[in-house]
Amino acid sequence: MKRQITIAFFLFNFFFGRISATPLPSISTLKQAIEFVDSIKTIEKSPYWVNVSPELFLQNLKSSVHNPISIYPGRSTNFCAFGVISQLVLEHNPLGYAKFMVQLYFTGHGDYNNIHFRPSAEVINAAGNLRFKGVLDINHAEQIWFLTLADHFKGYLNFFNHRYNPGDEDTFWAATNLKKFNKMARAVTGFKTKSVGGDLIHPRLKNTVAYLNNCLKKGFVVLYINNRILHKKNHEKVKFATPTHYIILEKIEEVNGTVTLTYWDSGGKSLRQMSVKTFKKILFGITLVSSDAK
């Protein structure tokens, strides 16, 4: 019986527990956010987001607040960085997020953490129309949120594609380099960031696993990785790669040259093992987000 309780506790923690190994300071609670969204029984159609279903918007807003880990950036999109930003926001200020989304829905613009978001007409028309992206197809609140973030924050990868066109959720319009990610993380939370590595270079660390465990004691740890290598069966055949994906590290350990990591990635937690050599090969950037990132 004791063993069953232990297993059940592990599974609950794995699928529904907090993302950050060391919780960040928050200015509102998940309980407050849940009470707010649950108080909204029905919602009228937005005069701005004309392709967004009121029912799907409200349903998705509630599911995101009740279970933030389930937020899914969509299949084949470049929204993964915004999925990570969503986890940061919902840990730091879930009530603020919920109220902002309602404001954005009804007015077509809104303020969050002293940032004014005013999405373009092209983005407003696109929300609700994304297709073949998995469950994101019916998650209309997340469509609004991801498209709004991508429209507002820009980095050098977006230089030649600033204006949204249909399908741009899969292109460089929605891409996020490491510097842009760090800027977003600071902007939406007010916290500090500390990074090693980059868009083309691997982190130069004596002991990567030890460094990451030290970061996990301080706050929220994001890894910028090559996801294509992560899912290849034969990692040794990969000669050259670039970073393509952001994940949130929850736990990492190394035993006899094998790295085991638990992380959040696009709608849920994952557990994966690989050699130290492979881990260093896929890892390009490490960002620590904390109230005092030193």
Image (tube, helix red, strand yellow):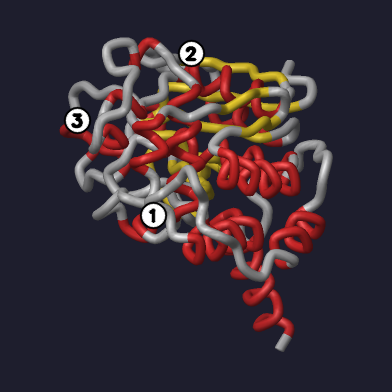
Q: What's under tag 3, amino acid-wise?
A: Val
Report whether 101 appears left or right of 27: left
Q: Is residue 42 above or below residue 120?
A: below
Q: Residue furthest front?
A: 47
Q: Secondary structure at mark 1?
A: helix
Of discs 1 and 3, which sits in the foreground? 1
Q: Is residue 248 above or below residue 205?
A: below
Residue on which the image places disc 3: 238
Q: Secondary structure at mark 3?
A: loop
Dot label at residue 264: none
Q: CA distance from mark 1 to mark 3?
A: 31 Å
Of discs 2 and 1, which sits in the foreground? 1
Visible residue check, residue 46: yes
Question: Residue at the location (65% across, 28% down)?
Answer: 188
Q: Give the quadrant of the N terminus.
A: bottom right
Residue 192: percent from the left, percent from the top? 71, 19
Dot label at residue 204: 2
Report whether 269 appears left or right of 155: right
Question: Residue at the location (60% across, 30% down)?
Answer: 212
Q: Which sits earlier in the primary sequence, circle 3 or circle 2?
A: 2
Question: Residue at the location (29% across, 24% down)?
Answer: 172
Visible residue check, residue 14: no
Report whether 226 appears left or right of 13: left
Q: Which sits earlier in the primary sequence, circle 2 or circle 1?
A: 1
Residue 234: percent from the left, percent from the top? 20, 42
Q: What's under tag 1, amino acid-wise?
A: Leu
Q: Which sits earlier in the primary sequence, circle 1 or circle 3?
A: 1
Front-lying residue, 31 or 36: 36
Residue on which the image places disc 1: 136
How crowded is the residue under tag 3: few (<14 C-alpha within 10 Å), some, or many (20+)? Answer: few
